[in-house]
């Protein structure tokens, strides 16, 4: 009798031991996965208003949170231990540094978007600003800090190429990110400013674009790279989000906010070069005549 009781007890213990892992697995499967993307401030509108909600709708159980600031600040935060899963920079410089330091997952990076750098004024401004060179006419100018803000680095590069950096920077206020610069101009705290075209489009009711950087004033196009961080604990979900950001569907949304998918920009440039190369000399001579 006692043997039967002992056997029954042992059987019960074994059944419970098998059930506990199964319950734990069920709980794990039901848990929500949270991804954190460290993204340039100029991406906040497109990410928060459309891209993240759409991805979450298509991927139940995955929650995406964004941390938005200048790419330089985000790079520093990542180096100091920020637990982000992806990094979406407004310039290749910050991405390259993190890659060299071993923070980025190998072969996960992609040059995703292209933007433009523009000079803006408040909507009701009477300032005569018809070219980038005319920034020298403004009494106060808002710029991103070139030490940490890519938009500020591009502004400095363009103004330096025009031999205007010393003159303009002497009367400039430097923002910690491009959103701060945009707000200063929109509020009238600065007579003019330099931001991304996408930011100006997002505040079209408050600011007006007056000029783009002149051709040749920037050595490289304004590229936005994105990649997965090596420290992520949710590789599958991070890869799914990265794939989504590279999709045609996401590309159309980025276009709505003024970005150009980088692949499309490359293709247009290549087509233009091909057309130029294929133009017959005889045709040119006929036009000249």
Image (cartoon, rainbow, N blue to C red):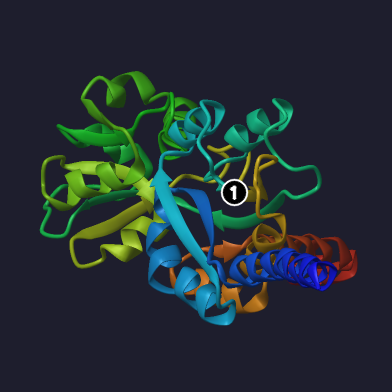
Residue nearest the observer in this picture, 67 or 197: 67
- Give the residue displayed 11% in from the left and 47% down from the top: 188
Q: Quadrant of residue 281?
A: bottom right
Vertical side of 9 occupied by 193: above or below: above
Q: In the rendered picture of this protein, how many numbered marks are placed on residues? A: 1
Instruction: Please name the residue shown 29% across and 26% down the image.
Output: 168
The location of residue 166, given as percent across then percent down, is 34, 18
Where does the image place residue 52, in percent across and percent down from the top left?
Answer: 48, 69
Q: Position of residue 37 (x, y in %)?
A: 52, 52
Q: Is residue 18 left or right of residue 198?
A: right
Q: Residues within 10 Å of mark 1 (few under 14, many from 20)?
A: many
Of the 4 image quadrants, the one containing the N terminus is bottom right
- Tell me, yes or no, if residue 264 can be seen here: no
Compared with 79, 32 (above or below) is below
Q: Is residue 57 visible?
A: yes
Q: Front-most of 98 and 19?
A: 19
Q: In which quadrant of the rendered image does the C terminus lie?
A: bottom right
In percent of the image, x 63 and y 41: which residue is there?
220
Determine the residue located farthest toward the front in the rendered image. Answer: 1
> In x, y percent, where is residue 279?
84, 67
Horizontally, residue 83 falls left or right of residue 73, namely right
**Residue that badge 1 annotates:** 85
Q: Name the secondary structure under disc 1.
A: loop
């Amino acid at each position: 009798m006692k043997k039967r009781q002992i056997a029954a007890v042992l059987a019960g213990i074994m059944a419970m031991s098998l059930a506990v892992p199964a319950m734990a697995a069920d709980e794990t499967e039901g848990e929500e996965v949270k991804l954190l993307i460290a993204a340039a401030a100029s991406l906040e509108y497109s990410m928060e208003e459309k891209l993240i909600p759409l991805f979450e709708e298509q991927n139940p159980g995955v929650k995406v949170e964004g941390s938005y600031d200048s790419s330089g600040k985000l790079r520093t935060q990542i180096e100091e231990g920020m637990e982000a899963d992806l990094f979406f920079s407004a310039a290749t410089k910050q991405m390259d540094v993190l890659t060299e330091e071993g923070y980025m997952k190998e072969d996960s990076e992609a040059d995703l978007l292209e933007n433009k750098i523009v000079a803006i004024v408040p909507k009701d401004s009477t300032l005569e600003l018809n070219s980038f060179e005319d920034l020298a006419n403004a009494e106060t100018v808002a710029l991103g800090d070139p030490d940490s803000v890519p938009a500020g680095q591009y502004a400095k590069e363009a103004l330096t190429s025009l031999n205007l950096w010393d003159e303009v920077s002497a009367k400039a206020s430097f923002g910690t990110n491009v959103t701060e610069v945009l707000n200063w101009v929109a509020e009238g705290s600065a007579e003019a400013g330099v931001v991304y075209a996408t930011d100006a489009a997002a505040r079209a009711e408050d600011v007006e674009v007056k000029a783009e950087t002149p051709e040749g004033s920037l050595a490289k196009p304004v590229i936005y790279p994105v990649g997965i961080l090596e420290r992520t604990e949710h590789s599958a979900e991070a890869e799914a989000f990265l794939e989504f950001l590279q999709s045609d569907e996401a590309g159309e949304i980025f276009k709505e906010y003024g970005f150009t998918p980088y692949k499309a920009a490359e293709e247009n440039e290549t087509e233009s070069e091909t057309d130029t190369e294929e133009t017959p000399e005889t045709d040119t001579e006929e036009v000249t005549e």
